[in-house]
């Protein structure tokens, strides 16, 4: 019996599968499992022996060099960096860019083994979603203000990408599956993951899913010979884009409109307090002026009667609750006085405590709320006000800062270790109002690459990304095309390859799918 166990454990292919499954499930549940998985496949590689031939085969393969080229670029970037300590840390983080392609070059999986790895990955993603729902329902007894905080194992951005990959992987296997029962289970799982993106308000994930789906529909619309299928695949994206454009335009119009029922600027409240007005402030909520008709003493007295959070305190988002209350009452079109506060429902009071400043947020969906939030962010920015913590506007500031750095370091960039230092110096130079915790990098992988490694390194980075896709005609493989689109789209708003989970997610599936493309 022990002999049989030893024989099984000595199988390098089995070890490869165990290691790959460990990485796959670790992507959504546990970073240590990612590291353990890499150690296991490294051990399996050593067990196979024949080192010289396998190393020679790898380093004489053009594709292999392309797949590790980003790691090589990062190494070269150390030659002219000044912050060597940060540079070494970055190289350690990027080791999977070399390790995974190098090891997986020797691993050939069957279609069944590829499916097994995906199913294990899917189990990890599903487990993470179920845990999020458990927390949302109060399982841990903690208060969740922002649903995105329900992503308990990863950044909500990365979690959204993982869910998108799982959705397209499920779509692939749904079409391939012959067994009706299995097909139904996979389909239900797919629908659950789509719904979950909306339940957690993972806006980036929803956006990536939508754009990827539209591109795939258009691509396969051109390929299909069926007129009916072609019509559906072309019309659906057009309708979705058209409706989205209409809704966004309507939201902008509604945001800037002035209510036709503007409250009369009264001198005194019904309880006798003199109203305070700031006639120079044009801020509005639902077309009503925010800083007019305010009875401050009445608001404080009444609010402290109905809430356990003091009027001078902060809501659960860390904002002054006084400001949240005033904006909320304004959105209802009411005078800001004692009567308005006492008329608030328990649901409205709870919403204000959670940092919700507009009554419409109680009935609108997550997409509507996010669009209105983005419009408000840009309006706030255009008025020259504080934009700390406003994620969309801050990205615009990050990109402008990055461009200023790039202009000073066009050819070779600032080097592997100096990217954050360069941003910090530029923020100081620009007298940026961003606080220290928000003085981040570009949040765009392409921009980050060009700023870090210059024009030459940036072009090589694009080769690293796009050469395999073009040279191997990978657009013909649905699974790879969907994966590639998800990752590329994410790189426009995130430094996807500068986090452990993000870079491992990319290089793991990129290497696995490229080296086993015949099995797709």
Image (cartoon, helix red, strand yellow):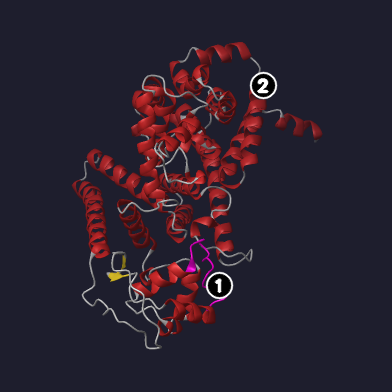
- Magenta residues span 307-321
Residue 35 in view of the camera = yes
Picture coordinates of residue 137, whole percent (x, y)? 57, 67
Q: What residue appears at the point 46 percent right and 30 percent down from the top-left corner? A: 422
Taking the image as shown, residue 3 lies to the left or right of residue 47, namely: right
Q: Mark 2 or mark 1: which is in front?
A: 1
Quarter location, residue 102: top right
Q: Is residue 19 above or below residue 255?
A: above
**Residue under label 2:** 46
Where is residue 143 drawn, in percent x and y?
58, 65
Q: Is residue 16 left or right of residue 234?
A: right
* The image quarter in which residue 45 lies: top right
Under circle 2, the secondary element is: helix
Q: Residues within 10 Å of mark 2 (few under 14, many from 20)?
A: few
Spatial distance from mark 2 to mark 1, Cα to Cα? 61 Å
Q: Main secondary structure of the magenta part?
A: loop
Could you tell me if residue 478 is visible in this image? no
- Point out the tag, 2 or 1, that comes first from the N-terminus: 2
Residue 33's spot in the image, x, y percent? Answer: 64, 40
449 in magenta: no
The image shows residue 216 at horizontal and vertical percentages of 31, 43
Label 1 Cα crowd, 10 Å radius (few <14 / some 14-19 / many 20+) = some
Asked if residue 166 is positioned above or below residue 503 in the image, the reply reads below
- In front of the other: 487 or 443: 443
Rendered-image quadrant of the C terminus = top left
């Amino acid at each position: 019996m022990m002999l049989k166990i030893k024989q099984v454990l000595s199988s390098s292919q089995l070890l490869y599968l165990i290691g790959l499954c460990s990485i796959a499930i670790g992507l959504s549940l546990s970073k240590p499992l990612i590291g353990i998985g890499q150690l296991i496949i490294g051990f399996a590689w050593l067990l196979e022996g024949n080192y010289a031939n396998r190393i020679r085969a790898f380093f004489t393969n053009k594709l292999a060099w392309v797949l590790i080229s980003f790691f090589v670029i990062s190494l070269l970037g150390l030659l002219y960096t000044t912050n060597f300590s940060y540079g070494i840390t970055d190289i350690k983080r990027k080791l999977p860019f070399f390790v995974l392609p190098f090891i997986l070059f020797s691993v050939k999986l069957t279609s069944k083994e590829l499916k097994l790895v995906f199913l294990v990955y899917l189990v990890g993603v599903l487990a993470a979603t179920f845990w999020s729902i458990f927390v949302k329902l109060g399982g841990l007894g903690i208060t969740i203000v922002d649903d995105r905080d329900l992503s308990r194992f990863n950044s909500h951005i990365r979690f959204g990408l993982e869910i998108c990959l799982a959705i397209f992987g499920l779509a692939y296997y749904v079409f391939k599956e012959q067994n009706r029962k299995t097909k139904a289970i996979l389909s239900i799982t797919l629908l659950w993951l789509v719904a979950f993106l909306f339940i957690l308000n993972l806006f980036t994930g929803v956006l990536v899913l939508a754009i990827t789906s539209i591109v795939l529909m258009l691509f396969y619309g051109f390929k299909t010979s069926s007129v009916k299928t072609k019509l559906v695949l072309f019309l659906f994206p057009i309708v979705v884009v058209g409706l989205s454009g209409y809704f966004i335009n309507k939201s902008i119009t509604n945001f800037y409109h002035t209510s036709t029922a503007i409250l009369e600027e009264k001198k005194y409240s019904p309880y006798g307090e003199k109203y305070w007005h700031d006639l120079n402030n044009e801020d509005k909520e639902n077309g009503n002026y925010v800083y007019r008709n305010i009875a401050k003493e009445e608001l404080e007295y009444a609010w402290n009667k109905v809430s356990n959070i003091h009027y001078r305190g902060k809501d659960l988002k860390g904002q002054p609750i006084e400001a949240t209350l005033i904006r909320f009452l304004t959105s209802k079109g009411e005078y800001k006085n004692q009567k308005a506060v006492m008329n608030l429902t328990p649901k409205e009071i709870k919403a204000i405590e959670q940092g919700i400043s507009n009554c419409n947020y109680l009935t609108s969906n997550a997409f509507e709320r996010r669009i209105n939030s983005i419009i408000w962010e840009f309006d706030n920015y255009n008025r020259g006000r504080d934009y700390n913590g406003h994620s969309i506007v801050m990205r615009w500031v990050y990109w402008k800062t990055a461009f200023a750095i790039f202009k000073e370091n066009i050819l070779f960039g600032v080097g592997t270790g100096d990217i954050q230092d360069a941003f910090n110096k530029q923020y100081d130079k620009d007298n940026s109002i961003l606080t220290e915790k928000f003085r981040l990098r570009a949040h765009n992988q392409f921009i980050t690459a060009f700023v870090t490694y210059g024009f030459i390194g940036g072009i090589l980075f694009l080769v690293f990304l796009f050469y395999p896709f073009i040279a191997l005609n990978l657009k013909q493989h649905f699974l790879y095309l969907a994966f590639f689109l998800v990752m590329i789209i994410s790189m426009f708003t995130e430094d996807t390859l500068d986090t452990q989970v993000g870079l491992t997610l990319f290089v793991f599936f990129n290497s696995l799918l490229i080296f086993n493309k015949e099995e797709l």
